[in-house]
Image (spheres, rainbow, N blue to C red):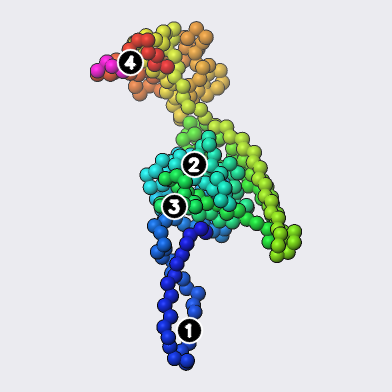
Amino acid sequence: MGTPLSIDITLEIGNAADVIKVEAAADQVNTVNATLGNVVERETITTLPLNGRNPLNLIVLEPGVTQRSGTTINVNGMRAQAGNVTIDGIEANEASNPTPTNNVFRVNPDNVEEFKVTTSNPTPEEGKNSGLNVSIATRSGTNQFHGSLVEYFRNNDLNSNEFYANAQGQSRANLKGNQYGYEVGGPIRKNKTFFYTAWQGQKVSLFPGHRPKPSVPCPACTLRRRSQACTAIDSDPANPLTINGVKVTQNSPSLVTPTGAYASGIRDCASPSDRNCVQSYNIFQNDPRTSAATPPFSAF
């Protein structure tokens, strides 16, 4: 797709009895330019697993492409925002998050015929930026009517709990996802005019089963004082503390009263090995240069 290929063939004058045999083999070495890339065809798009039904996630399988976090993709050391995405030759970059896996039309495996990934030295018709360049070709109608329906379903009832969440008695994350849609195409006038349409919707509900641990304020302390320490509840996963019938496995505002004092049953740890209590660590007193912070710095 969009890649020029030249094949030099030399024919010599022979006798009338000579037979010229033409084979279907082709030289795949590009001698026209120094462009590096690959075409991801429809068979690959429809057969490889895709979490989220985004065919552009297959870009990470190309040589020189690295996925950092989320949708951030770098190619050959270039910036993640230095990519360019076109759909049928029209620019489709998303201004708020200009990474190659995002586009303003949100393509899916149903409406993409193929796409070309150029990782180095793009030609003028496909290159705009120094990073990854992606050229997408959408599907079109044919002389035959065809269509399909899709439902991609995920549910936390089908998944086991995470190991560490289960060890601490925490519930599974609430994950419910539905992606649904259709695609249909066919002829308007055979061999002349065709139509094709596709649509996809999604509904995702995700709530983590456990929260990061916030700091528990010291009793009646002034947060801007240099002597204050960072504190956190140190729970025993095998035998967690129970307060008013609720297991204490992580920090919570309910562990202190509105005045800043510990709630009933909450205490300071007597030693570093003590459990089901509040451990403290003073980052200022343990700073050998005493330069971690100066008033009025707050540790929380």
The residue pinned by badge 2 equals: 99
Nearest to the observer: residue 31 or residue 283: 31
Which amino acid type is marked by label 2?
Thr
Which residue type carries mark 1?
Ile
Q: Residues within 10 Å of mark 2 (few under 14, many from 20)?
A: many
Compute the Cα span from label 3 to label 2: 17 Å
Q: CA distance from mark 1 to mark 4?
A: 85 Å
Q: What residue is shown with label 3?
A: 122
Residue 8 placement, left or right of 294: right
Numbered disc in front, either 2 or 1: 1
Density class for disc 1 (Cα within 10 Å; few <14, some 14-19, many ≥20) is few
The residue at 59%/47% (across/down) is 107
**Residue 275 place in picture, x, y as percent:** 41, 23
- Choose top left, top right, bottom left or bottom right for residue 73: top left
Decide which of 245, 145 is in the foreground and name it.
Answer: 145
Picture residue at 45% right of the left edge, 39% below the top: 81
Q: Residue 86: image x %, image y %?
A: 54, 48
